[in-house]
Image (spheres, rainbow, N blue to C red):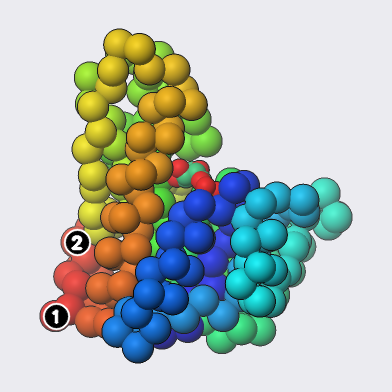
Amino acid sequence: ARLVVLVSGSGTNLQALLDAIAADPDGFGAEVVAVGADRTGIAGLERAERAGLPTFVRRVKDFASRAEWDAALTEATAAYEPDLVVSAGFMKIVGKEFLARFGGRVVNTHPALLPSFPGAHGVRDALAYGAKVTGCTVHLVDDGVDTGPIIAQGVVEVRETDDEDALHERIKEVERSLLVEVVGRLARHGYRIEGRKVHVGE
Ligand code: GRF
């Protein structure tokens, strides 16, 4: 399967995918064909360039409207003919055109146990709320914010000593292995969406 990965930051989820594919190029069942971002100057793009991958950047502020940005992101992504789009720390909500083109084929990873703590500050919100456990969720993207059908989740204990960064780092360890496992399974076995359920490999 052809993957386009969208990033906004350090790209450690992207790196985990690249490392897993490099470790088993024939068995993993997918290849990253391009990396897209909503901003320049991020480690995620450097990781892509180090891996010799094509990259593209579409910044919201470079477009007259959000819809035009969405159209540009869709076009840039479609150029690589992905079977699956992986949003790995991509911090923008894709719009109607993107979903019309790739709906049902966009996987997102979120650093909280959805439906708890959706949005851009899931780690901070769980910590502030006093949650005893949190974690990460790998789900299909629908037209809401972090509301699509859940594919897998991983639990992470919250420690008394945690601040946002420490907790997020521990979540990311679980998240990276969960994302690699899910993307590999979806790529190798395919999946079927039935309401809020995602049946993998059937
Ligand atoms: C991940 O925890 C992702 O869930 C969140 O931001 C983080 C991105 O990490 N949205 P990285 O860029 O993959 O290192």
Front residue of 162 and 198: 162
Quadrant in the picture for residue 141: bottom left
Quadrant of the drawing holding the N terminus? bottom left
- Residue at 43 percent of width and 32 percent of height: 168
Give the residue pinned by disc 1: 202
Which one is closest to the eye, mark 2 or mark 1? 1
Quadrant in the picture for residue 114: top left
39 up-or-down from 192: above or below: above
Give the residue pinned by disc 2: 197
Q: CA distance from mark 2 to mark 1?
A: 12 Å
Callout 2 secondary element: strand
9 left or right, relative to 82: right
The residue type indicated by label 1 comes to: Glu
84 left or right, relative to 62: left
* Label 2 C-beta lies within 8 Å of the nearest ligand 1 atom: no
36 left or right, relative to 25: right
- Residue at 56 percent of width and 80 percent of height: 33
Front residue of 4 and 94: 4
Asked whether residue 32 appears in the rendered view, the answer is yes
Front residue of 96 and 167: 167
129 left or right, relative to 51: left
Quadrant of the drawing holding the C terminus? bottom left
